[in-house]
Image: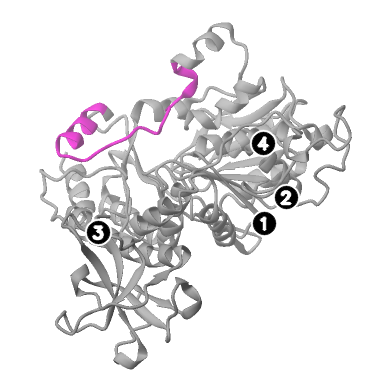
């Protein structure tokens, strides 16, 4: 600063200055001895406004220097420019840094809100122009709250997992109705943890060992299958059923062998697979069930008369928070369970494989940090550096979690809009069933749709490539059902040539049909009905 005045000082103003009794200095300007300041009011002014989100109560004990006769309110939304020559002489009052952090954060929140309203909101509210406006299959839907949370967390500069991550894990677990939720850096990492935790020796005879088999499908995302192969277990692929696009439960018994240990499968584009049959199969044979819930957050399934969110009926569920998904952190994911033992083991694997469960920045939660015997280590070896498993570091940053907290509050609305858009597409294309296999929800399910699937019939008179090119030319983004048939991809070349490392039950005829003839369009909540109707019209008129 060009003068002796500091940020956080409170000054009374000269009578010739603007009619405000006193101000708190927020920041210097480029002009000498000139500052941006916030108005300080008291109850005596008749302008208390304690309900304002930008007002901060300053009490006498909040001062680091000087004495404040009465509590006052600092208004971060009532700013003025003052000069040092406007200050009355007298005792210098200065607010403590902790209280200044509260004040300055509210000021920063105000700027974040203004930035959203000036920059992002106009783009989000731009009118749809048919044939010119792009209709993506998915994307970020946000408002000023995400920016406010993001700025707030960055100002703390904690960076790694912290208070926002703790808050998200608690609120997300409450939303789903599960005992334990852990944030991770992606949905793929969530799948990795969900599988690898089932290989740990603490699970005894039920642990998955190399060479054991896991029933799954080939028409999905590769990171549902990748952990199985990377560990040395054997994926056993079963076919899908139309029009639900989920695994065909008729193949489950045929897929089981003496080495089968688990079923790991996704709910296709938000449509739950038949959890009643699959869970019954797993329970009957003592198999683990991992629900890849990355594309189905908010979907529900009615089991024995009670509705449950998908991801909560199996032993472990996973979610992804990549931007096109039901909610986003940019990158991020979650793994969750009702099983206390699995919850503890998942935490260890996520956090380097350590035995200690102290949060970052905390020590000696167990009160026995230097008193225990571990493995072949000397007695009393620091528990914070004892490793029970070969783990990873898959935590999110605090800033990602902050965005997630704002997104989670919007999730019920996101789900409702996805369902509305899907129903609009389904109704608008109902009489196109002669050309397309139209999607249907699974019985006993209430899907939270990720997209709208269409399979071109053999007798349609056109191919998938032709209609996809037509839609893309009209600005409508399309996607395949992920891998289509993962076994036919280059990553499977060596295994396919040797016939080792995986097993196929049946011919996967429907999987190949999906690979050749299926595509999907979006239903994400950033899409208004004008865009949905344009998609319907573009498909119908092809």
Q: Against 1, is 468 above or below? A: above
Q: Earlier in the sequence, mark 2 or mark 4?
A: 2
User: Could you tell me how far apart the alpha carbons at marks 1 and 2 are, in whole angstroms?
Assistant: 7 Å
Q: Nearer the viewer, residue 107 or 33?
A: 33
Q: Which residues are magenta?
A: 465-489
Q: Against 16, is 206 above or below? A: above
Q: Which label sits in the foreground, 2 or 3? A: 3
* Residue that badge 2 annotates: 339
Q: Earlier in the sequence, mark 4 or mark 3?
A: 3
Is residue 487 located in the magenta-colored stretch of the structure? yes
Question: On residue 28, which mark appears?
Answer: 3
Q: Which label sits in the foreground, 3 or 1? A: 3
* Residue that badge 4 annotates: 349
Q: What kind of element bears circle 1? A: loop
Q: Are marks 1 and 2 in contact (CB under 8 Å)?
A: yes
Give the class, few, some or many, for how many residues have Cα within 10 Å of label 3's Cα (few <14, many ≥20). many
Q: What kind of element bears circle 3? A: strand
Q: Earlier in the sequence, mark 3 or mark 1?
A: 3
Q: Nearer the viewer, residue 188 or 438?
A: 188
């Amino acid at each position: 600063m060009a003068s002796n005045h500091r940020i956080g000082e409170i000054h009374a103003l000269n009578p010739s200055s603007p009619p405000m009794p006193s101000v708190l200095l927020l920041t210097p300007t480029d002009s000498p001895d000139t500052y941006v300041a916030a108005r300080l009011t008291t109850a005596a002014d008749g302008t208390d406004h304690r309900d304002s989100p930008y007002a901060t109560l300053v009490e006498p004990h909040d001062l680091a220097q000087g004495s404040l006769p009465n509590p006052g309110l600092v208004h971060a939304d009532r700013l003025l420019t003052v000069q040092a020559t406007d200050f009355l002489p007298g005792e210098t009052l200065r607010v403590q840094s902790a209280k200044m952090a509260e004040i300055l954060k509210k000021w920063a929140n105000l700027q974040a809100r203004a930035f959203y309203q000036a920059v992002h909101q106009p783009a989000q509210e731009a009118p749809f122009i048919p044939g010119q406006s792009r209709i993506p299959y998915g994307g970020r839907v946000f408002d000023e709250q995400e920016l406010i949370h993001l700025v707030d967390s960055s100002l703390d500069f904690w960076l790694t997992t912290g208070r926002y991550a703790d808050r998200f894990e608690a609120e997300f677990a409450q939303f789903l109705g599960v005992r334990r939720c852990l944030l991770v850096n992606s949905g793929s990492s969530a799948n990795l943890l969900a599988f690898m935790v089932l290989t740990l020796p603490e699970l005894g005879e039920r642990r998955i060992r190399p060479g054991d088999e896991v029933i799954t499908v080939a028409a999905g995302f590769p990171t549902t299958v990748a952990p199985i192969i990377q560990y040395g277990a054997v994926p056993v692929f079963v076919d899908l059923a139309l029009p639900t696009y989920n695994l065909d439960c008729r193949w489950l018994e045929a897929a089981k062998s003496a080495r089968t240990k688990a079923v790991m499968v996704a709910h296709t584009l938000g449509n739950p697979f038949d959890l009643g049959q699959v869970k019954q199969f797993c329970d009957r044979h003592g198999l683990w069930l991992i629900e890849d819930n990355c594309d189905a957050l908010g979907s529900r399934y009615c089991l024995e008369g009670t509705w449950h969110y998908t991801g909560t009926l199996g032993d472990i569920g996973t979610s992804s928070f990549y931007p096109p998904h039901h909610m986003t952190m940019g990158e991020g994911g979650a793994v969750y369970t009702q099983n206390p033992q699995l919850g503890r083991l998942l935490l260890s694997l996520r956090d380097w494989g350590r035995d200690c469960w102290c949060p970052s920045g905390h020590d000696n939660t167990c009160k026995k940090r230097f008193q225990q015997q571990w493995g072949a280590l000397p007695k009393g070896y620091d528990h914070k550096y004892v490793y029970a498993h070969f783990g990873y570091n898959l935590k999110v940053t605090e800033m990602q979690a902050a965005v997630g907290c704002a997104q989670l509050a919007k999730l019920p609305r996101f789900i409702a809009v996805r369902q509305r858009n899907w129903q609009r597409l389904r109704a608008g294309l109902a009489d196109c069933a002669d050309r397309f296999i139209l999607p249907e929800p699974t019985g006993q399910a209430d899907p939270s749709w990720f997209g709208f699937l269409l399979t071109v019939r053999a007798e349609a008179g056109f191919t998938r490539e032709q209609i996809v090119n037509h839609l893309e030319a009209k600005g409508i983004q399309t996607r395949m059902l992920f891998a289509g048939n993962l076994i036919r991809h280059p990553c499977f070349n060596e295994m396919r040539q040797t016939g080792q490392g995986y097993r196929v039950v049946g011919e996967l005829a429907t999987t190949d049909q999906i690979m050749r003839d299926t595509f999907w369009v979006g239903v994400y909540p950033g899409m208004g009905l004008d865009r949905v109707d344009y998609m319907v019209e573009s498909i119908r008129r092809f």
